Image (tube, rainbow, N blue to C red):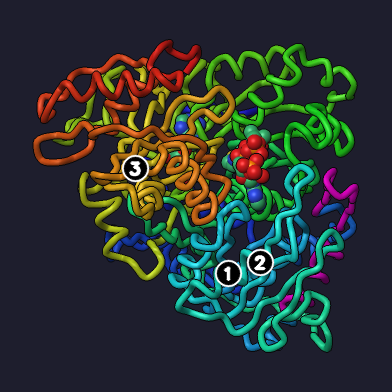
Amino acid sequence: MLLPYNTVYQRSIENPEEFWGEAAEKLHWFKKWNSVLDTTNPPFFRWFAGGVTNTCYNALDRHVDEGRGNETAIIYDSPVTNQKQRYTFREFRDIVSLFAGALQSRGVRKGDRVIIYMPMIPEAVVAMLACARIGAIHSVVFGGFASHELAVRIDDCKPKVIISASCGIEHSKIIDYKRLLDFAIELAHFKPEICIIKQREQLKAELNEDRDLTWQQSLLGAEPAQCVPMEATDPLYILYTSGTTGQPKGIVRDNGGHMVALKWSMEHVYNVKPGEVFWAASDVGWVVGHSYIVYAPLLHGCTSIIFEGKPVGTPDPGTFWRIVSEYNVSVLFTAPTAFRAIKKEDPNGLFIKNYDLSGFRTLFLAGERADPDTVKWAEQKLSVPVVDHWWQTETGWAIAANCQGIEPGPTKYGSASRAVPVYNVKVVNQEMEELSPGQMGDIVVKLPLPPGTMLSLWKADNRFVESYMTRYPGYYQTSDAGFIEEDGYIHIMSRTDDIINVAGHRLSTGSIEAELCEHPDVAESAVIGVADDLKGEVPLGFLVLKSGVDTPHSQIIKHVVEYVRENIGPVASFKNAIIVDRLPKTRSGKTLRATMRKIANCDEYVMPATIDDPAILDEIKIALQTIGYAKQKKQNR
Ligand code: COA
Ligand code: AMP
């Protein structure tokens, strides 16, 4: 019998310490906490201060010690290499503890940083958990980022060791990870002592004898490592995410609060039980992968799937249904863009009919607003509840969701449902006045944030306070805008900063603009996100050239597209730019990106009162129309 939402929510807000203290009892602690919530140094709130635990112990060893060692922890399914492999909790614990021992034997200790730059193979998860086991702080960098982005992260977190692979496989393309890694290390000022490379048979990497070891070599002579006791408040990982500047933000997550929140979410948000199969079809390089491929399912004793493939093309749009059926997946979590890709190739859901999906219970979507059309299509074709839920790298788990383990409310298309218990969400105006239901404004969350959310930014406490905690004192500024209905349903409509969302991936327009300005002929640039049927949004560049430039425009555009791909990575999906005479600006010189975006997408806009020269907007509209934008509003966006 599920408890009513209002009862759980009220309790969580009125007595968070009792609420979370109870949730924490379900995990193993070497030593109990002194206080559930330490509020002595706001906005640096600390959960379970004084508690001593180990996240890897709770994710693996605990299940073995409790007699569930022979149950499946991890399934690796790779349609791109035709491999499938199952690991029990006992097997995975043994693999992880041996690799953890290998890291220790190379001098990796508690607090050292380890970068993981890997495709979706089991070794990526082994590396993460091995770090957690010995108290090293992992920082996973998504494989779709190119060398320059990796170098920025190397310089910021200064890893003792980098763990990578010789290659990744994207559809049928082989991506030479080692080449990208070598170049990143060349670009970075900081140099790691050791690189451990998983050699894959599709492409063997050349090793640098003074620095590189193969995965196998690293294990020679290693002894399994025990779990190192960690303070609940010690960092578990750093995950970089786009900020509004070119410098990414290193989100730092703790050990104690993180494991408590994630385990609670498995039961209450996702309504899964230990022993069931939970599949997050994402990548370990993103927060969804950290939380729901690796930590949450294992902490809860579920089976998790590492899928090395795509929703379409590996080999067809039935792959997801093959996996759900073959492994009896109870809950699937992915991004709406994956469903748009499937729907495009299999609009009538014919592939779905080939598989027995009787064990499949719920589909969760996140990463971008789930457009009503996609949600309705999925509901109709799959006959299961489709739950859009809203969260961010900063929070590490859902802020709003139709919690399936608490009495769920009705589905409302376009809304991420109500606040998850313990998140006190409000919509405010610039003067910080709370707005009435239905009114659009900035979305904020009252402090303290729940456990599992960020501790701070890596070595950048001031940036943490300035970016998130200063604009609305006492609240976390989410940088999302939207409204809340009378009944508490939250609608997330857009970002309030210069972040765009491409296929569920978060990108800074500022960092793309910086690349465009690297071109010798470019005087100035602007990047906006334009609506895209598949990826939700894709970046589009505007270039103002230096005077006297006579290079053909097509050549300049080709070069800047290559720059972005080479320096930020293919994941940016930057494919096009337009050359214009000037950019629309305010009188104080700020580029009016939001207005340009509205013109491109045919959304209504109000002429900004501070615009310097309104005529420029007409020029921008004409330029956009020459490449097919600013003509017709896209449906359902
Ligand atoms: N390593 C190297 N390159 C990568 C990569 C990785 N891990 N992931 C993506 N890329 C490359 C792709 O090969 C592609 O390169 P291309 O320009 O040469 O074709 C480019 O980055 C863009 O990738 P992607 O956005 O994945 O586009 P796609 O066209 O290959 O696939 C979708 C489209 C919708 C199928 C895909 O974006 C998808 O599955 N999205 C799910 C989103 C998701 O998991 N989000 C995480 C938050 S839940
Ligand atoms: P990331 O940090 O990469 O997870 O991206 C977080 C951002 O993605 C949020 O700030 C939102 O702008 C957007 N986002 C994620 N999930 C949703 C959702 N369910 N609805 C609307 N926007 C979302």
Q: CA distance from mark 2 to mark 3?
A: 35 Å
Report which residue position mark 2 lands on.
179
Q: CA distance from mark 1 to mark 3?
A: 33 Å
Residue 82: within the magenta? yes
Which residue range is magenta in the image?
A: 74-100
Q: Which mark is residue 550?
A: 3
Neighbor class of circle 3 (other Cα within 10 Å; few <14, some 14-19, many 20+) is: few
Q: Amino acid at mark 2?
A: Arg
Mark 2 in CB contact with mark 3 (< 8 angstroms) = no
Report which residue position mark 1 lands on.
183
> Can I make out residue 7 in this image?
no
Q: Position of residue 455 (x, y in %)?
A: 41, 61
The number of callouts visible is 3
Q: Classify mark 1: helix, strand or loop.
A: helix
Residue 476: within the magenta? no
> Can I make out residue 560 in this image?
yes
Q: Nearer the viewer, mark 1 or mark 3?
A: 3
Q: Nearer the viewer, mark 2 or mark 3?
A: 3
